[in-house]
Amino acid sequence: RRPFLQGHESDISQLDKIFTVFGTPTETNWPEHKALPLPSRGLTWDHCIPVPFDEIFTAAPDDALSLLGCILTLNPEQRFTATECLSHRYFTNDPSPTPKNRLELG
């Protein structure tokens, strides 16, 4: 009921917010991160360890947490595509989605 990773006044403060949740980029979790503009100019962050999604989204079921983990990952090469997301078990588990003809389109 509140924005997740709500933006702040600058790119650096936004990155701080992201890294506080996802952990600081490393050669293990995002090998190419040092090629980005800020790190390539020598900007570094304090070491942060990732916060497990089940500690953030305490009411979310396991399949939702799994999908979030596939979408919200630092390394863009590891993120799910839209097609991969739609194939995730989150979209096939009960309760079934509302049939398209029953959705109200405003």
Image (tube, helix red, strand yellow):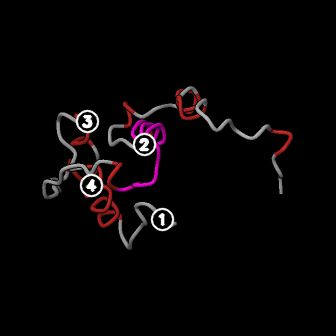
Q: Quadrant of residue 98?
A: top right
Disc nearest the viewer among 3 and 1? 1
Q: As drawn, is 91 to the left or to the right of 78?
A: right
Q: Is residue 62 magenta?
A: yes
Q: Is residue 22 magenta?
A: no
* Local SS, label 3: helix
x, y (%) of residue 46? Answer: 13, 58
Q: How many marks?
A: 4
Image quarter in which the C terminus is found: bottom right
Q: Between residues 89 and 82, which one lies in front from this camera angle?
A: 89
| Residue at numbered disc 1 | 3
- Earlier along the polypeptide chain: callout 2 or callout 4? 4
Picture residue at 30% right of the left edge, 67% below the top: 13
Q: Quadrant of residue 45?
A: bottom left
x, y (%) of residue 5? Answer: 40, 61
x, y (%) of residue 53? Answer: 35, 48
Disc nearest the viewer among 1 and 2? 2
Q: Which mark is residue 65?
A: 2
Q: CA distance from mark 2 to mark 4?
A: 18 Å
Q: Are marks 3 and 2 in contact (CB under 8 Å)?
A: no
Which residue sits furthest right? 101
| Residue at numbered disc 3 | 32
| Residue at numbered disc 4 | 19
* Local SS, label 4: helix
Q: Are marks 4 and 1 in contact (CB under 8 Å)?
A: no
What range is drawn magenta here? Answer: 56-70
x, y (%) of residue 1? Answer: 52, 66
